[in-house]
Amino acid sequence: MAEQAVWYFDFISPFAYLQFARMRALAGRWPITPRPVVLGAVLAHHGQLGPAEIPGKREFTYRMVQWSADTLGIELHFPPAHPFNPLAALRLAIAGGTRWESIGEIFDHLWKQGHAGDSAAALEALGKRLGIVDIEPAIAAAAVKEQLRANTEEAISRGVFGVPTLRLGNQLFWGNDATPMIEAALADPEIFRRGEYARIATLPSAVARVRDRGQVG
């Protein structure tokens, strides 16, 4: 694989948790770099709401997440509240070296064990297991904050619009459902640049919606 592969994620996303194990397994075969980003900033840049911010869609999404986990045989328990502020967990991942092992520990804390992770206090015991004795100054360090900011800005500049997203060169694969596509693209980076895939990449629009009025025009 000649192209760089980067996996963008935010701990606030249960779909990132569902995809994590397969991404980590793929990283054992291909050089994939995990990169924590702030989903809220990505959504704000694109003028979007998250699924959990839309009544009706929120409830369905939660059922879909739990059903997917049950179907895949992945243990999943929602944190005490969702959405939650993920900054402490994201910064802990960076303070811990942005390693697959430490990222997995944080995901398990939040989504397998169902614990809170929205503050230094909520992550204190986990931080110690990761070798960070005094978590509060570690996640408040200027270098850690700047790295998370840089990660998020880099993701936005690459066109990322949600998480989880795998970037392979300039191709983006969004969502847990795209995992089989990721596996195909890692094995053959040109697969989605040939044939009909090449045509639909530049498909024109025939109608546009006026966003502020919910109309077409």
Image: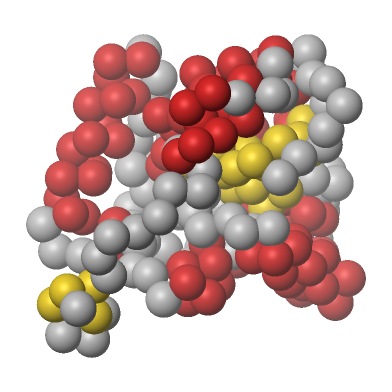
Residue 155 percent coordinates (x, y) = 68, 59
Q: Which residue is more in the foreground, 5 or 67?
A: 5
Q: Which residue is more in the foreground, 203 or 95?
A: 203
Describe residue 136's horizontal placement relative to residue 182 as left or right. Answer: right
Residue 138 percent coordinates (x, y) = 81, 64
Q: Which residue is more in the foreground, 215 or 2?
A: 215
Q: Hey, which quadrant is residue 143 in on the image?
A: bottom right
Q: Which residue is more in the foreground, 112 or 69?
A: 69
Q: Is residue 148 visible?
A: no
- Asked if residue 183 is positioned above or below residue 150 in the image, the reply reads above
Describe residue 80's horizontal placement relative to residue 28 as left or right. Answer: left
Residue 62 percent coordinates (x, y) = 23, 44
Q: Is residue 101 visible?
A: yes
Q: Residue furthest bottom?
A: 212
The N terminus appears in which quarter of the rendering?
A: top right
Q: Hey, which quadrant is residue 74 in on the image?
A: top left
**Residue for point 16% across, 85% down:** 213
The C terminus appears in which quarter of the rendering?
A: bottom left
- Asked if residue 39 is positioned above or below residue 77 in the image, the reply reads below
- Asked if residue 181 is positioned above or below residue 214 in the image, the reply reads above
**Residue for point 64% across, 47% down:** 8
**Numbered disc total:** 0
**Residue for point 17% across, 74% down:** 216
Q: What colouring style does the render use? A: secondary structure
Describe residue 2's horizontal placement relative to residue 165 as left or right. Answer: right
Residue 153 percent coordinates (x, y) = 71, 69
